[in-house]
Image (cartoon, grey):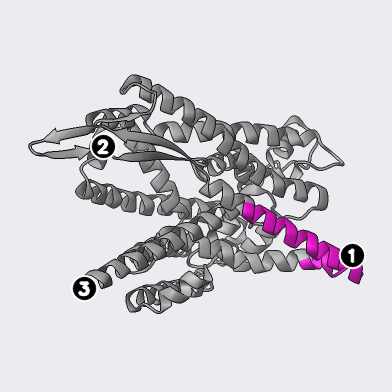
Amino acid sequence: MLKTLRKAFEIEDIRKKLIYTLMMLVVIRLGAMLPTPGADGEFIREFFANQQGDAFNLISAFTGGSLEQMSIFALSISPYITASIIMQLLTIAIPKLEEMQKEGEDGRKKITKITRYLTVLLALIESTALTVAFGRQGLLIDYNFVNGAVVVITLTAGSAFLMWIGERITEKGVGNGISIVLVINIISRMPDDFIALYYQFISPANFAMGTLAAIIILAVVVVMVVFVVILQGGERRIGVQYSQKVRGRKSVGGQSSHIPLKVNTAGVIPIIFASSLMQFPVLLASFAGGATGEGTGIGSAIMRGLSSNNWLNPRDLIPSWGLLIYIVLTVAFAYFYTSITFNPMEIANNMKKNGGFVHGIRPGKPTAEYLQKVLNNIIFIGACGLVIVQVVPFLFNGIFRANVSFFGTSLIIIVGVILETMKQIESQMLVRNYKGFLNS
């Protein structure tokens, strides 16, 4: 990877794109330090200091700590991510949007425009809910309409500005801008997590035990990264043969190809869906100041089970029933999301039109059924991989109370985006080499 970056900096066009991307990332981190006018940052920091769990870890990671500091980028690009997922689901459900998507570049531009408007609307709703929910509890220095409106406008504008930066990085920089913005926010939280691990396990111990703790932490991180790289890069290739056709005096077709089916077909979406669904009641109760699991009633018991901070605790394993539900939801969402984004029948029909077929399988419906069967097996393997990645942080949190934000979901995002960005850099370098060869 370092060798690829060094070669990329030697090429002027790619070097300009990399520098532009780095400058935009600096702007993002500077904006994450600017406080929201009229808001009491100390209140929100105290609130998050008393909250733990997967949902709060996700919020902290996705916003890069901006929400905890109540900066102008407190919402980060979460509204855009939500809007993109909603549009992807609506594209399947609404025929008009599906037709728009199939129109090519013009259709994609229309969908992108709708996504932008939906992002601003969601940012407005989220900022208003945040201001109203926390306003009376002490979020605003002076709780009145004017200060509340200032906070809502600032947070909405900050989220829209981050969306604009992400699109500019995609256009003038390197990689997918929105993904890169998300990754830089997650990475910005890693130093705090490592410092917390140092003071929790290494600093209080003697030299021998501290060294052993450091080695174990490093080994776990390396093993998790390697596992996620394998999970993200793994794929099943289904061979496709295209029949040879004679057109006039020329023979066309006859070449072999393949259909790549990724092991982790749905990416990180199943974990996000499952985590959001599980933690929504916990977040709602926390924002409303209701039951958080400290009582003895049924409501408190349910809250303890829904909060990932109580899972896999050797002293009290009863709340771990929530983890079982979490795992089931992750597997279910993996099948659900893949089913709406991958259409075996459409692929089979396109292959049939172009004279393609899978070896030993008849074209048309038999091919679609074969692809669906293979896909179901792959989805299960990928879902099991996601479950392993998501359970490891809960295991360490339950046993050692090591609560960090860069494991699980965050790690999958970091590895996936870095690998995809490096592929884009390598492809741009390859295209430039071809151009240079043709020009010479």
User: Label 2: few (<14), some or many (≥20) within 10 Å?
Assistant: few
Secondary element at tag 2: loop
Residue 136, image x, y percentages? 58, 55
Q: Looking at the image, is mark 1 or mark 2 earlier in the sequence?
A: 1
> Residue visible at 52% across and 35% down?
334
Q: Is residue 266 above or below residue 144?
A: above
Asked which quadrant contains residue 256, the reply is: top left
Image depth: mark 1 or mark 2 in front: 2
Judging depth in this view, the residue of 313 and 47 nearest the camera is: 313
Q: Is residue 232 above or below residue 330?
A: below
The answer to whether any part of residue 310 appears in the image is yes
What residue did someone put label 1 on?
209
> Residue visible at 64% across and 65% down?
190
Secondary element at tag 3: helix
Outermost residue toward the front in this view:
249
User: Label 1: few (<14), some or many (≥20) within 10 Å?
Assistant: some
User: Label 3: few (<14), some or many (≥20) within 10 Å?
Assistant: few
Q: Are marks 1 and 2 in contact (CB under 8 Å)?
A: no
